[in-house]
Image (cartoon, rainbow, N blue to C red):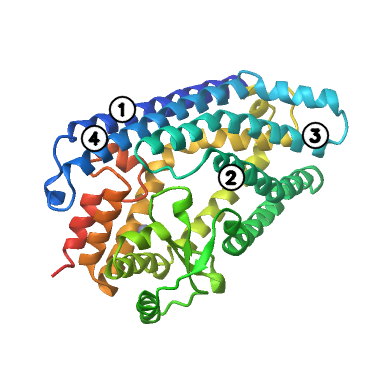
């Protein structure tokens, strides 16, 4: 059994990595072969210069993502079948023979530290080489590193209690530990959704109430018309880190708020902002957020039930290169290895998400003017240098949003 798992794991790791490389190469060559001409539908609204900038930016980002996925696959192989996790475990066992829960937490944190160290150069390169070159990076190096430290501290403060709870339940709560852990995990997630907008997001960005009175009253009229209650309209200083623009809803229940990136407000006019907001409202009206949360609960329930069973199988550890079985190793292996097994589900999730986007667009077309949503999309594509000519297969596999041309031609049905 152990050697079968090893073979399946290696085969899947190779297949997923080769798939990523292959899709990335297709994407780049599709973009480059369409680089010389702005697609017909955008000829009047996007210049050749902007189109070529988008092509080159998308190419650079895709190459970076592909290199990073190769590095991560190599790291995963080293940690598992290469014996890396066993080595880390052995080192901590040497320092701390007792206190299994505490040692387990240290082993898991060490493994995550190693993988974030591998990610770090890619993040750095993305901001200070790629985004810098295309004029999107607004971060200073000190901001980059202080964000990193803040993320680590917040992650530890929130994650450590959860990790201890998980290891404690695994050790002492009997056969159904995974069910109790699922309850804890679900409550934790709901709590995070509730406190994120008010307590966590402000650690990284400034949020100030929207002051433009005429825009505010238009937006409030739209919210009322759509029967939406929120805890206020906020502007986020997204421009301190990046010049990409966006708008989103955050929180749930009565803590919902509408957040606009300052970069978005600078670029879109009132009609376009209203249309973008109507699209976001469409996500709420169609319960996309709730459905997503429920889907996450179902997946984590199934995952934890599976882990409950795998934890007792010797071949699970042995097949993935771990010599000494323990609760924390089961948890760690599961966290690291399950994405490889789930990779092939990605196109399904992406297509589900694109279906949601169409629904939200339709809602926007009915409650605001589709013409302005098209205008806003074109501006956002242009200003974010998003490619208008993605490889169809790459897009089907990964993209949470439909390609611009598809969205716009659907919206065109609603414009008079
Ligand atoms: Zn959307």
Q: Earlier in the sequence, mark 4 or mark 2?
A: 4
Could you say whether the residue bearing mark 2 is in a helix, strand or loop? helix
- Name the residue carrying label 1: 25
Residue at 35%, 45% (x, y): give it: 399
Residue at 30%, 54% (x, y): give it: 380
The span from disc 4 to disc 2 (Cα, nearest Å) is 33 Å
The span from disc 1 to disc 4 (Cα, nearest Å) is 10 Å
Q: Are marks 1 and 4 in contact (CB under 8 Å)?
A: no
* Image x and y of residue 109, in percent: 70, 36
On screen, 399 above or below 250? above
Direction from residue 40 to residue 3 in the image, left or right? right
- Name the residue carrying label 2: 147
Q: Earlier in the sequence, mark 3 or mark 4?
A: 4
Around disc 3, counting alpha carbons within 10 Å, would you say few (fewer than 14), some (14 to 19), or many (20 or more)? some
Residue 2 location, quadrant: top right
On screen, 189 above or below 15? below
* Image x and y of residue 54, in percent: 27, 40
Around disc 1, counting alpha carbons within 10 Å, would you say few (fewer than 14), some (14 to 19), or many (20 or more)? some
Could you say whether the residue bearing mark 4 is in a helix, strand or loop? helix
| Rendered image: mark on residue 103 | 3
Q: Is mark 1 within 8 Å of ligand 1?
A: no
Question: Mark 3 or 4, which is nearer the eye?
Answer: 4
Can residue 105 be seen in this snapshot? yes
* Image x and y of residue 224, in percent: 40, 81
* Image x and y of residue 90, in percent: 77, 22
Question: Mark 4 or 2, which is nearer the eye?
Answer: 2
Observer-nearest of 380 and 19:
380
């Amino acid at each position: 059994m152990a050697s079968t798992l090893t073979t399946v794991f290696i085969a899947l790791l190779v297949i997923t990595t080769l798939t990523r490389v292959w899709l990335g190469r297709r994407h780049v060559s599709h973009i480059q072969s369409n680089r010389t001409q702005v697609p017909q539908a955008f000829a009047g609204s996007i210049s050749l210069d902007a189109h070529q900038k988008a092509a080159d930016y998308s190419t650079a980002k895709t190459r970076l993502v592909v290199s990073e996925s190769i590095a991560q696959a190599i790291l995963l192989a080293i940690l598992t079948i290469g014996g890396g996790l066993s080595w880390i475990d052995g080192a901590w066992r040497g320092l701390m023979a007792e206190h299994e829960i505490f040692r387990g937490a240290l082993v898991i944190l060490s493994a995550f530290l190693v993988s974030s160290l591998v990610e770090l150069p890619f993040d750095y390169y993305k901001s200070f080489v790629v985004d810098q070159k295309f004029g999107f990076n607004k971060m200073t190096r000190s901001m980059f590193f202080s964000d990193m430290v803040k993320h680590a501290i917040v992650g530890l403060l929130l994650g450590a209690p959860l990790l201890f709870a998980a290891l404690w339940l695994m050790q002492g709560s009997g056969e159904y530990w995974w069910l109790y852990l699922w309850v804890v995990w679900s409550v934790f997630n709901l709590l995070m959704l509730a406190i994120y907008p008010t307590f966590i997001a402000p650690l990284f960005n400034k949020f100030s109430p929207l002051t433009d009175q005429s825009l505010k009253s238009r937006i409030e009229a739209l919210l009322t018309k759509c029967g939406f209650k929120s805890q206020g309209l906020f502007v986020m200083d997204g421009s301190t880190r990046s010049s990409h623009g966006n708008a989103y809803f955050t929180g749930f229940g009565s803590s919902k708020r509408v957040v606009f990136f300052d970069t978005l407000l600078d670029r879109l006019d009132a009609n376009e902002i209203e249309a973008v907001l109507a699209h976001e409202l469409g996500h709420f009206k169609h319960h996309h957020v709730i459905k997503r949360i429920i889907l996450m609960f179902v997946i984590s329930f199934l995952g934890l039930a599976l882990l409950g069973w795998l934890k007792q199988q010797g071949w699970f550890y042995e097949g993935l290169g771990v010599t000494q079985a323990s609760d924390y190793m089961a948890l760690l292996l599961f966290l690291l290895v399950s994405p490889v097994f789930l990779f092939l589900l990605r196109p399904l999730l992406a297509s589900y998400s694109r279906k949601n986007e169409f629904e939200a667009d339709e809602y926007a077309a009915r409650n605001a003017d589709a013409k302005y949503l098209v205008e806003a999309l074109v501006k956002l594509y242009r200003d974010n240098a998003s490619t208008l000519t993605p490889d169809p297969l790459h897009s089907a596999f990964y993209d949470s949003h439909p390609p611009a041309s598809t969205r716009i031609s659907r919206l065109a049905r609603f414009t008079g």
